[in-house]
Image (tube, rainbow, N blue to C red):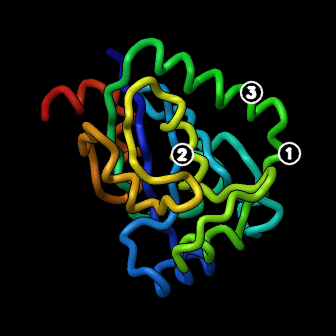
Amino acid sequence: MKEIYIVLTRSKTLLSNTIYLLSSFDYTHASISFDSNIDEMYSIGRKYTFSPYPAYMKKEYLDKGFFHYHKSANIGLYSVQVSDSSLIKMKNYVEELFKNNTKLKFSLLGIFYCRLGIAVKRKNKMFCSEFVCSVLKQADEELIDKSPEMCSPMDLLNTKGIKQLYTGKISDLVEIKKHHQLIDIYNTK
């Protein structure tokens, strides 16, 4: 068995605050990582740190770019065990999408459809938790029973076998990463 990592955050941007006002969700953004030290994450996010548009599928880093400027944001780090073949399928799916990352755009409208309970799959458009859920759907195991277009960041906490590893501020997690491999921290819990 292997582990994948779901990373949930809530910054203080206009978009995050709007989602929070409409939903009261503790977390308003979702990413997925395949490495235990969370050095690289994948999501649908902003190209430029200070502007929500344009936004598309991208790699994210806790200590660079957007998250570097939002160090005080709340973060929840979770792991899920998957089979070796599921991990390969998930990675291949992400790699395939990433080859055409500028084609896969952010779906602001999708967020509102999701909140209204209307399932609308839009061609080449996803919001962050829709993307993460679509990655989870590639697994051999049934990890989540939501359809991707109806999946909020908080719904990802219902992933089968999810285990909380860390909650706190991004800045604190980055400090921990400077001094330890995160896998060592997880194993002490």
**Residue type indicated by callout 3:** Glu
**Of 114 and 77, which appears nearest the observer?**
114
**Of 124 and 7, which appears nearest the observer?**
124
Figure quadrant of the C terminus: top left
Q: Is 151 left or right of 69, judged from the image as shown?
A: left
Q: Work out whether residue 105 can be spotted.
A: no
Q: SS at mark 3? A: helix
Residue shown at the point (81%, 29%) measured from the top left: 99
Residue at the spot of label 3: 96
**Image spot of residue 126 (x, y percent):** 69, 55
Residue shown at the point (36%, 59%) measured from the top left: 169
Query: What's the CA distance linking mark 2 and mark 1?
Result: 17 Å
Q: First in sequence, mark 2 or 1: give its number.
A: 1
**Residue type indicated by callout 1:** Thr
The reply to whether the C-beta atoms of the residues labelled 2 and 3 are less than 8 Å apart is no
The dot on residue 132 is: 2
Residue at the spot of label 1: 102
Q: SS at mark 1? A: loop
